[in-house]
Amino acid sequence: MKNTYIYSNWKMYLNDEQSESLLKSILLFFQSVNTENTSINHDHMLNFGFFPQTSCLMSLHKMIASCTSIPKNFNLTLGCQNIHHENSGAFTGETSINSIKPYCESVLTGHSERRIIFGETNANINKKTILINESLLEPVICVGEPEHLSKHAAEEFLRSQILSSIEGLNISNHLIFAYEPLGSIGTGIASNSKTVNSKAKFIKEILIDNDPTLNLEKIRVLYGGSVSDKNINDYLSLDHIDGVLIGSSSVDLEKFKMIVNKVTTQIHL
């Protein structure tokens, strides 16, 4: 079965009440998709992952668990935007993985906003990735090069991010990389689809070169950066892209619905 990933990073855009309202509207929309579709493609699974603020994970988890009237090929999960790299301890203001594990299946790590604003290093991201993997959750490792680098410099930048993030990692579960070039995050300037496909292929080649025994079926590469209904199908049609990580468009209900409609039309769900 083919899997496509539509992951939504809600960042710090919504409070708890707004998050619950948005998810309620999305679930109602998914129910209408189920009612209106007469030809379901049983060979294609759409995996929707929502990454809200930590404070509302429990309430959103209950909402998803109680929702039954959605298309059978829609898989809905929650993810956490960030965790500390230690299980517990004197880390004021941080989030432990044990506190979010009952509600989440995925955790973001390495997002450029965490790297740039909070000074997270490759070594710190590696510790988080290992902890997420050992906790049997799905790491979503964000990588992406700055603008204006030469082709060689950009590749070396990505190589360093990727290999440092998985050092010492036993890849026993699925592992997702989200390729987010810095020039496309929150700018409205989406990356050229041909370039994105080339970078996704490059990411997979790095992983195989690092470990020739690696099962590529366990690796997914998503694209993130100004994803919209105007370009979603361009990215999802690429050979080496398995889905998208959406930012601001995912907290705008109408924009999100347009994206989903484009996706379901493309795959005849």
Image (cartoon, helix red, strand yellow):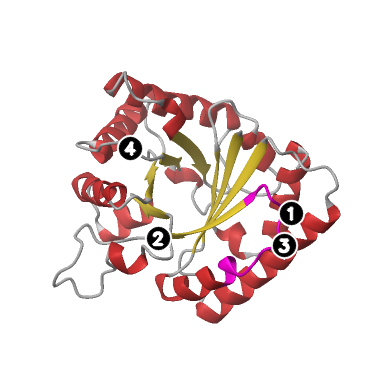
Label 4 vs label 2: CA separation? Answer: 22 Å
The residue indicated by pointer 1 is 258
The residue indicated by pointer 3 is 69
| Closest to the observer, 120 or 220 | 220
As drawn, the label of residue 81 is 2
Residue 178 in picture, x, y percent from top left = 44, 42
The residue indicated by pointer 4 is 172
Identity of the amino acid at label 3? Answer: Ser
Q: Is residue 223 magenta?
A: no
Identity of the amino acid at label 4? Answer: Ser
Q: Nearer the viewer, mark 4 or mark 1?
A: 4
Task: Magenta stretch: give its range.
Answer: 63-74
* Depicted 32 relative to depicted 112: above or below: below
Q: Nearer the viewer, mark 3 or mark 1?
A: 3
**Residue at figure coordinates x 54%, y 33% from the top left:** 241
Question: Which type of secondary structure does the marked residue at label 2 adopt?
Answer: loop
Identity of the amino acid at label 2? Answer: Gln
